[in-house]
Image: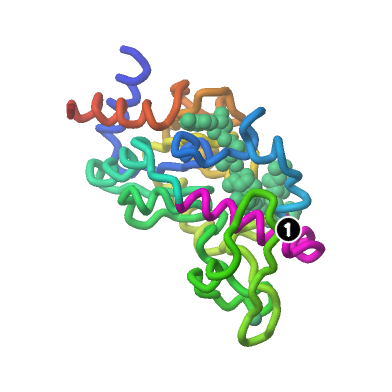
Amino acid sequence: MDETMRAAAMLREARHVVVFTGAGMSAESGVPTFRDDLTGLWSRYDAQRLATPEAFRDDPDLVWGWYRWRAARVRAARPNPGHVAVAALETRVPTLTLITQNVDDLHERAGSSCPIHLHGSLFAPRCAGCARPFPAELATADVEPAEGRRIAPPRCAICADAIRPGVVWFGELLPEDALAAAYDAATACDLALTIGTSGVVYPAAEIPRIAARSGAPVIQINPERSALDASCDLNLRGGAATLLPALLRTAWHTP
Ligand code: BJW
Ligand code: ZN
């Protein structure tokens, strides 16, 4: 039996599937990953200058402008057939928990019901001081974003502190409820799929490893080797937008 057939058989028999996604899930929608050699964001930008609380404190206009540009790119992107397949899988298996590290909204726009966002969202700005949510439409009302354009963040109407992106930066804690729900699902599931992640950023990278330690087989979809290879029972090498629809077609004999 080839690997796709084996993966399809595992999917068909599973009762609780955890789907864990990273930036590679959205790569074929035109949203850049972080660590791919030529196209990843960290090949062109310094994470320490953009994705830490210190970076925002030191140069809020640089950081806010960069996130506004990324949010505009995501808004112009469309879910790819991989996102659509993940949403369809939810209707095929008894229980599915979708856990994403992605800060885009492409899973939701493909029809997935309630992804757990471990690293926050590009579309949920909040006050850096009092943490009150800030209306996303007000956050985008001023300057047109463009690559490299600095934009001053709006100010909180209550405490006058700067509004920041609602994402999780290096050195920050992940949302407690989201992480607890993700750990619970990884412990309880009987099959995990890890899709398009390098598996190097913790604590998120624990999710497939917890599933493996709890006895669930883990299937990986990634065109390249990753830090998760050794924790996976099956490594399907290819892009999410091609392999996921093929996997569903094989599992449920749909056209
Ligand atoms: C395809 C494809 C296609 C391409 N189809 N696939 C334990 C050990 C060591 C360090 C730490 C540790 N615990 C904590 C840390 C520190 C740190 C960390 O992990 N650092 C490591 C990098 C060394 N973690 C943290 O700081 C976290 N906070 C925390 O732990 O708090 C407590 C604490 C604080 C301080 C000290 C100790 C504890 C917070 C992490 C926040 C991560 N934030 C970011 C940015 C979000 C905002 C933004 O978007 O700007 O999240 S970093 C970035 O990496 C982003 C991603 O969600 C995350 C993961 O990346 P991902 O998704 O895996 O993308 P890539 O690019 O790495 O991989 C893409 C993959 O896709 C590749 O494999 C491709 O091959 C593949 N691919 N095309 C399928 N078509
Ligand atoms: Zn405030």
In-image side of 84 versus 18 (left or right): left
Residue 193 drawn at (x, y percent): 42, 36
Magenta segment:
52-75
Q: Is residue 203 visible?
A: no
In-image side of 181 versus 12 (left or right): right
Ligand 1 is in which quadrant of the figure?
Answer: top right
Q: Is residue 246 visible?
A: yes
In-image side of 37 versus 16 (left or right): right
Residue 99 drawn at (x, y percent): 45, 49
Q: Going by the picture, which residue comes out furthest to the bottom?
A: 158
Identify the residue shown where x is 65% and y is 28%: 38
Residue 176 sits in which quadrant? bottom right
- In this rendering, the answer to whether 217 lies above or below 167 is above
- In this rendering, the answer to whether 208 lies above or below 173 is above
Residue nearer the viewer, 238 or 71: 71
Residue nearer the viewer, 202 or 170: 170
In which quadrant will I find the N terminus?
top left
Residue 140 sits in which quadrant? bottom right
Q: Is residue 100 magenta?
A: no
User: Is disc 1's CB within 8 Å of ligand 1?
Assistant: no
Residue nearer the viewer, 66 or 222: 66
Residue 166 drawn at (x, y percent): 58, 63
Identify the residue shown where x is 37% and y is 57%: 114
- In this rendering, the answer to whether 232 lies above or below 149 is above
Q: Going by the picture, which residue comes out furthest to the right?
A: 58
Q: Is residue 55 magenta?
A: yes
Identify the residue shown where x is 66% and y is 61%: 64
Identify the residue shown where x is 50% and y is 74%: 135
- Residue position for label 1: 62
